[in-house]
Image (cartoon, rainbow, N blue to C red):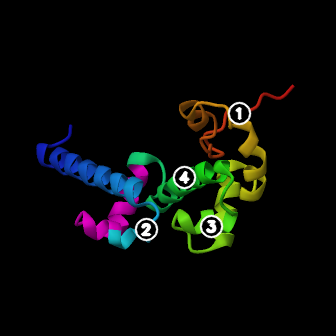
Amino acid sequence: MTSRPAEADHLRDLARLRRVRDRIDREYAQPLDVEALARGVHMSAGHLSREFKRAYGESPYGYLMTRRIERAMALLRRGDLSVTDVCFAVGCQSLGTFSTRFTELVGMPPSAYRRQMADRTEEMPSCETKKVTRPVRNREAPATSRP
């Protein structure tokens, strides 16, 4: 049985984690690091990282990169920006790291995604485009059945 003070601490931590997640969603293009995020909610960086992963299934950095890649996907589909411009527009400082993470999450390099998706989603409503182009991490991908 959980004591009331422990339960209150847990609820307070969840509210802090939600503020961190909301900040990442709003400020994904800004330079963000775990220490700064933790300071903003009066937690240690280690505690924030552990509790964020427990609550959301990924680290604060992983969540930030997912938001950046989602936004990059939208910018690449427009087709009017280079991969380098998109990389910096979403807050990444390294084209190599951006390309690697993009490929891990999306399954293809950003340049290939830009070529392939620009025409494919042109006539699609934006709400449908967002749904079908959402990045899927390997652990989220449905298992393929083997014949």
Residue 34: where, in percent of width, then height? Answer: 39, 68
Is residue 39 one of those drawn in magenta?
A: yes
Q: Residues within 10 Å of mark 1 (few under 14, many from 20)?
A: few
Q: Quadrant of residue 60?
A: bottom left
88 with respect to 111 (left or right):
left
In front: label 2 or label 3:
3
Mark 3, residue position:
85
Mark 4, residue position:
71
Q: Which residues are magenta?
A: 37-54
Which label's residue is closer to the chain start, 4 or 2?
2
Cα separation between marks 4 and 1:
26 Å
In front: label 3 or label 1:
3
Residue 30 is tagged as 2
Cα separation between marks 3 and 4:
13 Å
In front: label 3 or label 4:
3
- Residue 65 vertical position relative to residue 121 in the rendered view, above or below: below
Q: Are marks 4 and 1 in contact (CB under 8 Å)?
A: no
